């Protein structure tokens, strides 16, 4: 499907974005392994989250969904009768692997062509050390075959900053003999830790170390999911680069391990205001107000910042392409093993729009230009590439045509409808 985007006069309005994708995944998983009932409000019905839901059903979880409310009755998981299809979702595969590996049954997990090209050694290694038998294609790639077992806790230093790998180990430890100690070099998003604590699990952090108890019993809860910050970032970015714009985003998730993008735009010269701050089920949220405040300036982004902005880097590349001066992004090699090679994808497509962008092995060098031009660009079947290029189209002269735009359904099915709602052309 093609999507046509034209330059707009301004971005304006008051919106809410759909529920947080990371929290939606985790609430399904925790509800399915907890005693009693779990009720989830504002669940994100994206393709990725629905993949997790369907896989859990095949594992024996009792799940009912009506609109954006999900009810789960905690049941003991069982061996699935068929292969588990994780679709495009790395979160589904990596997190469920932790649960499955700690149960005594046989499971095969697969996904689409993109997911089957993503490395899984990073979870295979710790799960194997804990006592599971995990086999991947060519030793590293899906489909994964897992023969579960009663696992033992582990002391493990993460070789890469990855919330998915960390979560996989935490989830496997819940059912293991003995606890685990997980050490992070850089602290990554902590939704799993917060949710485990909310479901009455035992976990604590001391500096860069996380201590998880084994053999835990969790209790079902009511979960209220705030708006997804990564989804909101496209509207924040659009407001910052389209002249005369102002936007209010309500009920927005403001977990500090997710909001590094706000730190980046502040350094680039952007301004914002947060109000109505509150905390629900361990997750902070509030209202964010943002307005256009002139042309932004280029900055340097270092490796230590990457875990908190990993999903927003393609968007930052767009913003930098029309900012004053030079922007350098380093330490982001993880982008090459996402749904696509996002470094190559953004470099290739933004060049078509007249951006002065150079590809580095671990990021970008971007020199701001006066304006972008409309062009026919491709999403590379990557939802974050598609949405970032859509933001670029809002300021580009003429028309921008995005090929394979339907991939936004992976995380944000309502993206284009909401974009139209806040776009003013008169």
Image (tube, helix red, strand yellow):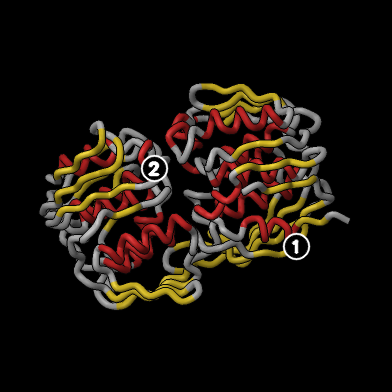
Task: Look at the picture and state if 156 lies above or below 189.
Answer: above
Relative to residue 195, is residue 294 drawn left or right?
A: right
- x%, y% of residue 126? 22, 40
Which residue is at a point 74% across and 33% down the rendered structure image? 322
Which numbered circle lies on residue 13? 1
The residue under label 2 is 115
Toward the viewer: 99 or 236? 99
Mark 1 falls on what kind of element?
strand
Residue lying at the far right in this picture: please name it.
Answer: 426
Which residue is at a point 19% across and 51% down the rendered structure image? 101
Check disc 2: other Cα within 10 Å, few if <14, some if 14-19, many if 20+.
many
- x%, y% of residue 229? 55, 54
The image quarter containing residue 103 is: bottom left
Relative to residue 304, is residue 166 drawn left or right?
A: left
- x%, y% of residue 152? 12, 49
Residue lying at the far front in this picture: please name it.
Answer: 1
Mark 1 vs mark 2, CA separation in Å: 36 Å
Which residue is at a point 67% across and 52% down the rendered structure image? 235
């Amino acid at each position: 499907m093609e999507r046509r985007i034209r330059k707009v006069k301004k971005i304006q309005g008051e919106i809410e974005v759909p529920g947080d994708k990371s929290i939606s995944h985790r609430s399904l998983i925790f509800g399915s392994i907890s005693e009693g009932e779990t009720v989830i409000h504002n669940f994100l019905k994206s393709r990725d989250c629905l993949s997790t839901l369907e896989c859990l059903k095949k594992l024996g979880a009792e799940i009912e969904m009506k609109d954006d409310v999900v009810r789960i009755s905690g049941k003991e998981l069982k061996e699935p009768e068929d292969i588990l299809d994780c679709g495009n979702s790395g979160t589904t595969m990596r997190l469920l692997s932790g649960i499955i590996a700690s149960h005594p049954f046989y499971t095969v997990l697969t996904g689409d062509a993109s997911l089957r090209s993503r490395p899984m050694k990073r979870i295979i290694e710790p799960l194997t050390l804990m006592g599971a038998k995990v086999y991947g294609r060519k030793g590293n790639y899906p489909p994964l075959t897992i023969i579960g077992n009663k696992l033992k806790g582990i002391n493990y230093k993460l070789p890469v900053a990855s919330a998915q790998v960390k979560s996989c180990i935490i989830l496997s430890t819940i059912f293991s003999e003995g606890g685990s100690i997980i050490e992070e070099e850089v602290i990554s998003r902590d939704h799993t830790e917060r949710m485990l604590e909310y479901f009455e699990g035992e976990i604590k952090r001391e500096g860069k170390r996380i201590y998880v108890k084994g053999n835990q019993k969790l209790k079902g809860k009511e979960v209220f999911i705030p708006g997804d910050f990564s989804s909101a970032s496209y509207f924040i970015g659009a407001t910052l680069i389209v002249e005369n714009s102002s936007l209010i985003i309500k009920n927005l998730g403001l977990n500090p391990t997710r909001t590094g993008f706000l730190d980046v735009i502040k350094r680039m010269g952007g301004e914002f205001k947060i109000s109505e701050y509150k905390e629900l089920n361990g997750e902070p949220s509030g209202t964010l107000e943002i307005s256009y405040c002139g042309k932004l300036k280029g900055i340097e982004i270092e490796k230590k910042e990457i875990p908190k902005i990993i999903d927003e880097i393609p968007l930052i590349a767009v913003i930098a392409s029309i900012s004053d001066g030079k922007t350098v992004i380093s330490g982001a090699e993880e982008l090459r093993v996402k749904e696509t090679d996002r470094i190559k994808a953004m470099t290739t497509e933004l060049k078509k729009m007249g951006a002065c962008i150079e590809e580095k092995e671990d990021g970008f060098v971007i020199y701001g230009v006066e304006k972008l031009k409309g062009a026919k660009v491709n999403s590379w079947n990557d939802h974050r590439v598609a949405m970032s290029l859509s933001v670029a189209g809002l300021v580009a002269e003429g028309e921008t045509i995005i090929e394979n735009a339907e991939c936004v359904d992976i995380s944000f099915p309502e993206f284009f409808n909401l974009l139209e709602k806040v776009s003013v052309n008169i």
